[in-house]
Image (tube, rainbow, N blue to C red):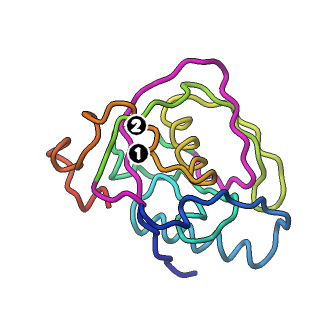
Amino acid sequence: MSRRDILKMGDARLLRIAESIVAFDTPELHSLIADMRETMAAVNGAGLAAPQIGINLQLVIFGGTEVNPRYPDRPLIPITVLLNPVITPIDDAEEFDWEGCLSVPGLRGEVPRWARIRYTGFDEFGQTIDRTVDGFHARVVQHECDHLIGKLYPMRVRDFTKFGYTEVLFPGISASEDD
């Protein structure tokens, strides 16, 4: 396992459409997932997408077993490895909430997301994942899956008066907690 560098907004690799994973349960895939877990844990991430570390594959990980210091008031999400995801909104209802991103350090923005979604895909062994979720869980999945289609959350901000530096918008959260 090794910690990987996280690409920052402006790097063209973050704008690519990720390729589907065709081989499950391989040593290479397990090694990549281990590196992503270590990287996400080291920076207190709520999730991480393979494109954020320069790997152009449809792979995201999210969730954890402890309260995240970057999102201390948010509910726990089960740790999930999700490959080749498909997101389907349950209805047209949207929720606005603040988001940050490891690839956009020091900034936060208010972003609309579908309130309830169904997501499907596979785990690293090729087993089907099929969940219907709402709230923070739905937000995190949508945020991470956006990375697979070359979107960063600032591209979804509708009101730029609600986009800025974390330390200015939320004085109680240090910039180091949002990097």
Q: Main secondary structure of the magenta part?
A: strand
How far from the left and from the top, in percent, is residue 15?
56, 58
Left or right: 161 with respect to 134? left
Query: Label 1: how many residues lie within 10 Å, few (<14), some (14-19) or many (20+)?
Result: some
Q: Residue 21 versus residue 177: which sits nearer the camera?
A: 21
Q: Is 35 in the magenta? A: no
Q: Secondary structure at mark 2?
A: loop
Q: CA distance from mark 2 to mark 1?
A: 5 Å
- Residue 157, labelled with which disc? 2
Query: Is 23 in front, or is 66?
Result: 23
Q: Tell me residue 101's x, y (percent).
A: 41, 53
Amino acid carrying mark 1 in the image: Pro
For badge 2, the amino acid type reads: Val
Q: Residue 23's x, y, as percent?
A: 85, 67
Q: Is residue 103 left or right of residue 32?
A: left
Could you tell me which residue is drawn at 66 percent across and 66 percent down?
56
Q: Quadrant of the C terminus?
A: bottom left
* 10 Å crowding of disc 2: few (<14), some (14-19), many (20+): some
Q: Mark 2–mark 1 contact, CB under 8 Å?
A: yes
Q: Label 1, on which residue?
A: 154
Q: Is residue 169 above or below residue 179?
A: above
* Residue at figure coordinates x 65%, y 73% from the top left: 32
Where does the image place residue 103, in percent across and percent down from the top left? 42, 60
Return the residue found at the far bottom: 2
Residue bounds of the magenta highlight: 78-106
Secondary structure of the residue carrying tag 1 is: helix
Q: Is residue 84 magenta?
A: yes
Q: Is residue 58 above or below residue 131?
A: below
Q: Quadrant of residue 116?
A: top right
Q: Which mark is residue 54?
A: none
**Quadrant where the image shows the N terminus:** bottom right
Identify whether 94 is placed above or below 81: above
